[in-house]
Image: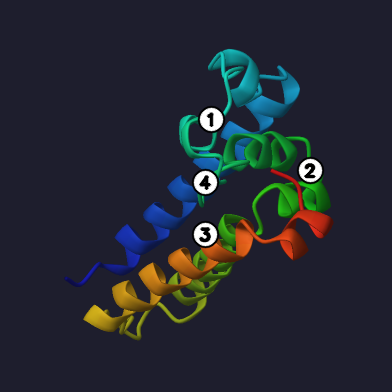
Amino acid sequence: MTLSHKTKRILCIGIWTVLFVGWFLFHHFQWYPTQWMGLSEGCIIKNTTGLACWSCGLTRMFDCIIQLDLLQAFRYNPYFFLWIVIGLLFLIWFTIHSFFFADKPIKIKFHWWYAVLFMISLIAFFILRNTSWYLQYFYF
C-alpha cells in the first residue's frame, strides 16, 4: 500500500493531534482510567492464580503517563512502557519521513518471526515478573 505525500502528512497530523488532545483532556480534567473505569478489584488473573500477568499494572501505568510520572509508569509495567516508547520513536520517524523525505517511499517489511519474538518476550516477561528479584525493584 502506497500513501500519497498529502495523505502521510494528514495521517501524521491526525495521530499527533489525537495523542496531544487526548493527553490534555485526561490530564487537565484528571480523568484517570482507574477512577472512571471503576477498577478497584484488581487483576482477575492475579486474584485467581496468585501470579502477576503480563498486563498487571497497565492501567496504573497509563495513569502515571497521563500525570507525566514516567519513572513510576516504568515501575508499574516496564514491558509495555518500552513498547510505548518504541511506538513513539516509530511515530517520530514516520513524521520526519513524511514531512522531510516525502518523495521517498517508506519500506517496512513485517516477517512472521516478529510475532514469534514478541510472544517469546511476552512469556519471558511473565516469568521474570513473578520472580523475587523483580518484586524488589518494580511494582504491580
Closer to the chain start, of discs 2 and 3, is 2
Are circles 1 and 3 on residues that touch, CB within 8 Å? no
On screen, 111 above or below 67? below
Judge depth for marks 4 and 1 and give the one in front: 1
Instruction: Compute the Cα span from label 4 to label 1.
Output: 13 Å
Q: Name the residue carrying label 1.
A: 47
Q: Name the residue carrying label 4.
A: 55
Classify mark 3: helix, strand or loop.
helix
The residue sitting at 76% across, 54% down in the picture is: 135
Instruction: Compute the Cα span from label 2 to label 3.
Output: 26 Å
Q: Would residue 63 be found to the left or right of residue 70 on screen?
A: left
Closer to the chain start, of discs 1 and 2, is 1
Instruction: Compute the Cα span from label 1 to label 2.
Output: 29 Å
Are circles 1 and 2 on residues that touch, CB within 8 Å? no
Image position, residue 9 (x, y; %)? 41, 60
Image quadrant occupied by the N terminus: bottom left
Are circles 2 and 4 on residues that touch, CB within 8 Å? no
Which mark identifies residue 68? Answer: 2
Judge depth for marks 2 and 4 and give the one in front: 4
Using a 10 Å C-alpha cutoff, classify the residue at mark 2 as few (fewer than 14 neighbours), some (14 to 19) or many (20 or more). Answer: few
Image position, residue 29 (x, y; %)? 71, 17
Front residue of 76/24: it is 76
Closer to the chain start, of discs 2 and 4, is 4
Q: Amino acid at mark 2?
A: Leu
